[in-house]
Image (cartoon, rainbow, N blue to C red):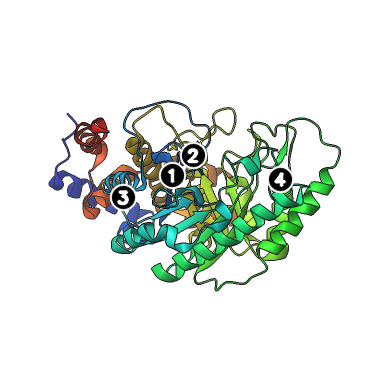
Amino acid sequence: MLNIYKERDINDSYERAKELYGSFGVDTDRVLEDIKKIPISIHCWQGDDVGGFEVDADGVLGGGILATGNYPGKARNAEELRQDLDKAMSLIPGKHRVNLHASYAETEGKFVERDELEPRHFEKWIAWAKEKGIGLDFNPTFFSHRMADSGYTLASKDKEVRDFWIRHAKRCREIGAYMGKTLGTPCVNNIWIPDGSKDLPADRMGYREILKDSLDEILEEKYDRRYLLDAVECKLFGIGSEAYVVGSHEFYMGYALTRGTLLCLDAGHFHPTETVSDKISSLLTYIDELLLHVSRGVRWDSDHVVILNDEVFAIAQELKRCNAFHRVHFGLDFFDASINRISAWVIGTRASLKAIMMALLEPTHLLREAEDNGDLGRRLALMEEFKSLPFSAVWDKYCLDQGVPVGAEWLNRVDEYEKQVLSQR
């Protein structure tokens, strides 16, 4: 049932779509080339439920962070995780990146404290990425650790705790710069911390001043931007920090503006009535580059698998209309342990790429022309008409040309992989 796509039919449909889009002044052949230049940073932690592969002093694997579900076959070590990523990436058109957390270090079963991590603990990841010709991104891991039990890390008033995490963050920048230099593409090193309070704090300012000083110390050493790009990530609330998060949007927006870092916007980190898409043009007016974590919150920051919904399309659409794809790093951040994990990666990445392609295909110049002429009724009418243009024919052509399954046929490949590999774990 799923294997119904024929190369001749795909090419015929594409030629008809090409002609129709051309009547609106859109060159679909160029779109097929442009989308190849927009990589998605695929997050490794979907593959093992954010567990990581750390071992404690007794050689026991660490616990990671909360993920719901217990679907069989999750990766138990880095080799299996890379194998699963290989499978997922073989079903996604284009060449993309992989995003690692520090907790995915490979230490050969030995305990290595987080403030002692080195580039050598990621050599296998780097060698794998080099072989595939892809880039790596990185994240310090500020959670699931005894030094994070208080709920505070870089903003902690306990100097011992704070200094530990500062050392960890410095090590992660070193690792990220090494990745970027070795692979020949800048590594985006994203700093997110869970610091905050479950109930009303009495000293909001104090914690924020500490966080600012900690970040300044971490970023004191300058790395070549050809190798390392630092980002800071804001959040509205979290489990255990419902009343107050030290690293709020306003805090990090000010920090990024004054320190020259990237600002990371996570689609699930704002109030449900706020949208990331609405913030992009304002921030790009002042900030050179943004990092986007595309996720799907269901009533809260629940990190559901990305689908092609209104907000994901609006994000891509805004990037097109701002001519800003070259100024934004597009990454994914979700973890669902209740479904096949390879399916989750493929669904989320393909949905994001579909949104990007739909945006690239938009005849934006006609919308601007109507707007500049004051014909707002025409602008609205065109926006509606463009929604029914044959995007899917161009998408199918892209998948065909990239040598990945067209339509739902990729599910057959996942089913085979589950029978042959996942079920044996």
* Residue at 57% across, 45% down: 266
Look at the numbered disc 3 and give the secondary structure of its residue: helix
Mark drawn on residue 53: 1
Circle nearer the N terminus (2, 4)? 2
**What's under tag 2, amino acid-wise?**
Gly
Which is closer to the viewer, label 2 or label 4? 2
Which is closer to the viewer, label 3 or label 2? 2
In the picture, measured across the screen, residue 260 lies left or right of residue 266, that is right
For disc 2, the marked residue is 62
Viewer-closest of 409 and 171: 171
**What's under tag 4, amino acid-wise?**
Ser
Look at the numbered disc 1 and give the secondary structure of its residue: loop
For disc 3, the marked residue is 20
Report the Cα–Cα distance between label 2 and label 1: 7 Å
**What's under tag 1, amino acid-wise?**
Phe
Which is closer to the viewer, label 4 or label 1? 1
The answer to whether marks 3 and 2 mark residues whose Cβ atoms lie closer than 8 Å is: no
Q: Position of residue 222 (x, y in %)?
A: 62, 72
For disc 4, the marked residue is 248
Q: What quarter of the picture does the N terminus occupy?
A: top left
Report the Cα–Cα distance between label 3 and label 4: 46 Å
* Residue at 20% across, 31% down: 419
Report the Cα–Cα distance between label 1 and label 3: 51 Å
Q: What quarter of the picture does the C terminus occupy?
A: top left
Circle nearer the N terminus (2, 1)? 1
Look at the numbered disc 4 and give the secondary structure of its residue: loop
Report the Cα–Cα distance between label 3 and label 2: 55 Å
